Amino acid sequence: MSETAQSEDFFIYRVGNIEVSIVNDGHITVPLAAGLIPGVPLSEVQASLREAGLPTETVTTTFAPLLFRSGPKTTLIDTGFGPDAAAEAGSTRGLLVGNMKANGVDPADVDVVVISHFHPDHVNGLLSQGKPTFPNATVMVPEPEWRFWMDIEEMKRAPEGRMSQLFQNNRRIFEQVGERLSVFKWGLEIVPGLEAVAAPGHSIGHTAFWLRSGGEQVFIQSDLTNQAALFVAKPDWHSALDQFPNQTVQTRRRFYDMLAEKRIPLQAFHHPFPGRCHLEKNGAGYRRTPIE
Ligand SMILES: [Zn+2]
C-alpha cells in the first residue's frame, strides 16, 4: 500500500514502524430529538451543529475502526456493525469488511481483534450470519467490560430498554468467540506497540489506547467523545449513551488537557473521517485541527 491508496474509506499513516489504516464503517443519520444530550435544550444543541456547518434537524454518527500492522501481526481495533448490518435495506453502516477487502486486507488475515467496549458499533462486526467474521483472530476484551456484561446478576438488574438489549446483544455476539477470547487488563502492552488505557465513563470498562513505535505515538480515544461538533467544543455535555455521565466528562477532560498540552495526535472512532487531529484548548472547550 502506498500514499496514493488514500481514499475516503481507507486512510493510511505511519506511527514509527507501524502502518495504521483507518477504515470507514459508514454512518447513521437520525432526526435530532430532545434528550440526545440530557439537560441541554435542543436549541443549544442546534446552535452547536449550526456553528460547525452541519444540518440542525438531524444528527449523524460516523464509525471508523482502526487496523494496524506491527511486525507480521495484523490487529483490528473495534469491528463496526458488521456485514449483516450492511446487508439491511437502505443501510449506510457495516462497511468495514467491504472496505478492507477493497484495499487488499482479507478478514481471515486479521490475527487480533481488540475491543474498546461492548456497544454494537464496536462489537457486532465480530459476527456475520452467525459465524466469526475474523475466524483466525484472537479477540481481546477489557477485563472490567467483560466482567460486567457477562454477569448474570447485572443482567437481571438492567433496566428494560437499551441496557437490557445491550446485555442480550453482547451474549449473542460473544457466544461464538469461545476459546479465541483473551481478557486484558489496563496499563499493559497487549499487542506489540499497543497499550490499553483505563478510560471508564462511557461504559464501565471503556478503554483507550496508546500506539507507539520508533519514538512516535498516537492516542486512540475510542468513544471519549462522540460527535466532534458537539462534545469536543462542549466537553461538559454528555450523551444519553454514556453509562456514567460525570465520570465520562472527567475522563474526557483529563485526557484532552494532556493531549492539548503535549500536542499529541488523537485518533477518534466517531469524529469526521479519518478522525485524526490535534487538540487545543478553546475557552471552556477544545478545538480540533484535522491531520490529513
Ligand atoms: Zn461508539
Image (cartoon, helix red, strand yellow):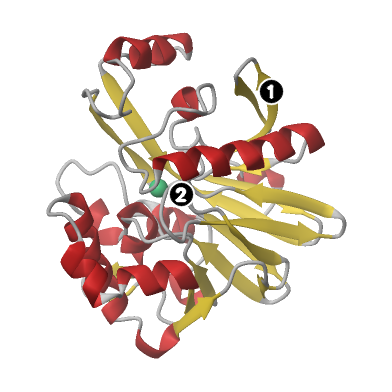
Q: Quadrant of the C terminus?
A: top right
Residue 201 shown left or right of residue 46 in the figure = right
Measuring 29% from the left and 60% from the top, which residue is drawn there?
83
Task: Tell me where residue 132 sits by quadrant.
Answer: bottom left
Q: Check the picture and name the quadrant holding the N terminus.
A: bottom right
Disc 1: which residue: 281
Query: Closest to the observer: 18 or 175?
Result: 175
For residue 137, say whether it is visible.
no
**Amino acid type, callout 1:** Lys
Residue drawn at x 56%, y 49% as measured from the top left: 22
Check the image and name the residue furthest to the bottom.
Answer: 179
> As displayed, is residue 57 above or below residue 290?
above
Distance of label 2 from label 1 (alpha carbons) = 22 Å
In the rendered structure, the answer to whether residue 217 lies left or right of residue 267 reads right
Question: As displayed, is residue 43 above or below residue 11?
Answer: above
User: Which residue occupies the foreground of this view, 25 or 149?
Assistant: 149
Identified at 47% across, 64% down, the residue is: 115
Q: Residues within 10 Å of mark 2 (few under 14, many from 20)?
A: many
Q: Does mark 1 have its CB less than 8 Å from ligand 1?
A: no
The residue wearing badge 2 is 201
Q: Which element carries disc 2, helix, strand or loop?
A: loop
**Residue 112 location, x and y as percent?**
53, 74
Label 2 sits on what residue type? Answer: Gly
Question: Could you say which is closer to the camera, residue 105 or residue 233?
Answer: 233
